[in-house]
Structures are given as structure tokens and as C-alpha cells.
Amino acid sequence: SAYIVADAFALDGDGIFSYGETSGLSLTIKNVGAYPIDGNVTVTLTTEDPLLTINTPTVVYGHLSPGETQTKDGFAITASTEVENGHVFTIYVNAVAGDDSWTSFIHVTVYKPILTFNTFSWNGSYEPGETVELTLTAVNTGSFPVADVEGTLASSSEYVTINGATQSFGDIAANGTASATYSVSISNDCPISEVIGFSIALSGDDGDITGE
């Protein structure tokens, strides 16, 4: 008898599926059976994963001889913005020809940036009345670039003024780093024993990606 399976797939564009993205998908099916299929094969994609939407699930293929493959585009999928980096979607490939049906599957991995604070350095001395430059480095440990990263610096000390609390880190590539420099003024009243703590809130991709 004939037997239809998913043989390969490809995504539109750069072929990388990222969080929040809608991508076209082309799918190659193969008849691994010993007999031909003379009529059409209707292929429908389904998933049980709530983080994946299959926008265009069904495409019709034609005749398939034994060992023959056939590729069609026209499928479309959308990843949720809530996915984790490296999440793998299982998509079931349901093929129907006449009274016969077969189910196989493909796996699609989705990628997302991960923003975190990495290191800091300063130019000057933390003394009362001084203004120093504090350089902070952010890292994208995810597998997809993040655009327009900004960092908002805050301090728990009442004796510290941050001159321009929000600075741009620019775009950060996957597994890349970027730095921004802040101007920090220390009050003349600051006790020598004061422990000055800082925190930073990072955001990129118009606020879709955050970190600290």
C-alpha cells in the first residue's frame, strides 16, 4: 500500500523562527509505500502546543508514486511572544487520500533573546562630592538578536543622583554584549560608610524583552 510521511520542511526568510513571528512554511511529503496514490493528498497541520498558532493549516498535494517526494508551500505558523528560547514545537502532519490517512510529525524550534546584566566598571572614586562614570555591560544569552536595548539605572542610596538614568545599549546580537555609560553624582553629605547599591532594568524590542 501507499504510505505518506513528512520528509522535510523549510521556513520563509532566514529560516529562523523567532518569538512572536509569523512564518510561511513549505513541507515536503514522501510516499514511502510500495503503491502509488493516484488522487490528491490533503495535508493538514495540527498541534497541541498552546504557544503555536497554525494560521493556514491545509494544503493539497497531487499524485505520488512510490518513493516520490512533493513539496508545497502555503502553510503559515505563528509563535507566541511568551515562548522560552529554544522551545520546540511538535507539529503533526495529517495526510488523507481517499479512505486512507497517515500521521507523522515535524519539530520546529523557536528562538528568543534573553537580556541580563553582566558586568560593571567605573572611572573615578566613590567619594562625597564626586561625579563618576559607571559603565554597565548587558548580555544577550538568547539565540536571537534584540533591538534598541535601553537600561534604566536606579540606586537605593538617597545620596546618589543619576544624571540621565536611561541610556541606550543599541542592538545586541545573539550571545553578544553591549555597554552604556552613566554619570553618577555623590552628595557632599554622603557618609564615608555608606554602601551604595545600584539596580538596572533592561528592555528591548519595544519592551517585549526585559531583564535585569
Image (cartoon, rainbow, N blue to C red):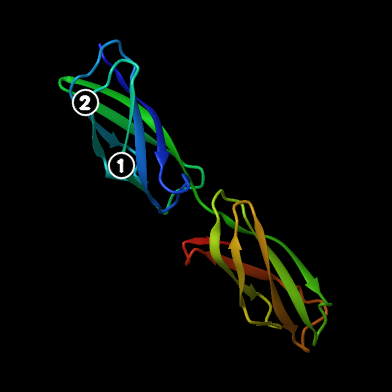
Would you place residue 93 above or below residue 114 in this image?
Answer: above
Count the marks: how many?
Answer: 2
Residue drawn where x is 62% and y is 78% of the image: 165
Residue drawn where x is 59% and y is 52% of the image: 174
Q: Is residue 161 shown left or right of residue 209?
A: right
Q: Name the kind of residue labelled 2 in the image.
A: Val
Q: Is residue 86 shown left or right of residue 192?
A: left
Pointer 2: residues within 10 angstroms few (<14), some, or many (20+)?
A: some
Pointer 1: residues within 10 angstroms few (<14), some, or many (20+)?
A: many
Q: Name the kind of residue labelled 1 in the image.
A: Phe
x and y percent of residue 7 in the render?
39, 26
Would you place residue 102 above or below residue 43 in this image?
Answer: above
Helix, strand, or loop for circle 2?
Answer: strand
Q: Is residue 148 shown left or right of residue 20?
A: right
Residue drawn where x is 47% and y is 67% of the image: 206
x and y percent of residue 84 in the render?
48, 47
What residue is pinned by disc 2? 96
Cβ–Cβ below 8 Å for labels 1 and 2? no
Residue drawn where x is 70% and y is 73% of the image: 181
Q: Classify residue 1 by image quadrant.
A: top left
Would you place residue 190 above or below residue 150 in this image?
Answer: below
Q: CA distance from mark 1 to mark 2?
A: 16 Å
What residue is pinned by disc 1? 75
Would you place residue 116 above or below residue 105 in this image?
Answer: below
